[in-house]
Amino acid sequence: AQRVTQPEKLLSVFKGAPVELKCNYSYSGSPELFWYVQYSRQRLQLLLRHISRESIKGFTADLNKGETSFHLKKPFAQEEDSAMYYCALRDLNTGFQKLVFGTGTRLLVSP
Amino acid sequence: DGGITQSPKYLFRKEGQNVTLSCEQNLNHDAMYWYRQDPGQGLRLIYYSQIVNDFQKGDIAEGYSVSREKKESFPLTVTSAQKNPTAFYLCASTIDRGTPLHFGNGTRLTVT
């Protein structure tokens, strides 16, 4: 069965420090990986997806099939990055968009 | 302004009562979803619907029911059979399998 693991419940860093939010997955097929973010008092929204290979708000994530990881990285954290981050996986072989979510990591960026 | 609207934002019920959570979207999306969000457990899929008058159980459907009579609406009923109904419920939609989910603001249900 598909599974997404986010080992850190809370990640606390200072402004300007590098950030890496870890995400590992278990899946035998061809997954599509996403990062969703939930800022305070805002709805859950897509941050980025691996097939886009783009940088959003300075964040990047590379799919490493050998290590089955999709870690989210940013070289210099900003206070406005403080939020809840969810890694999610979608089975590309299914006929609908069922996402399997990790348990989430709360990022706290202090001044 | 297009989007997904969930109402109410907060809902309180007594144990043993059924309660229905509303989810409406004006995005013309075909597929709609209900997720439950619990601390430390992430989001878990309750039910989903790919087209009108059709829906399927997700991973934790027991104690819940849904209907999809209109494309815009996908209400979720939390029945008295749901053993632990207190949670944050999120509705989402998407136009097709290739596009990301759009989420509503959620409904926090408290059952005492």
Image (spheres, coloured by chain):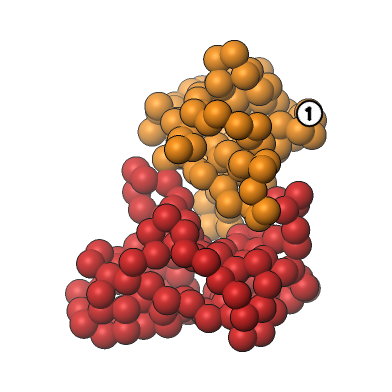
- Give the x, y percent position of residue A50: 71, 31
Of the pair B92 and A68, the residue shown nearer to us = A68
Residue A49 place in picture, x, y as percent: 70, 37
Name the side, left or right, on which B64 lies relative to B105.
Answer: left
Q: Does residue B37 appear to the left or right of A81 in the view shown?
A: left
- Residue B38 visible in the current orientation: yes
Quick one: quadrant of the N terminus of chain B? bottom right
For residue B4, above or below residue A18: below
Task: Residue A25 in the image: state x and y as whole percent.
Answer: 51, 28
How busy is the neighbourhood of tag 1: few (under 14 within 10 Å), some, or many (20 plus)?
few
Task: Give the amino acid type for the residue marked by disc 1 in the picture.
Answer: Arg
Q: Which residue is mark 1?
A: A53
Which chain is displayed in red in the rendered image?
A: B
Q: Looking at the image, is B45 positioned above or below residue B52?
A: above
Name the colour assigned to chain A in the rendering: orange
Q: Dot 1: what SS? A: loop
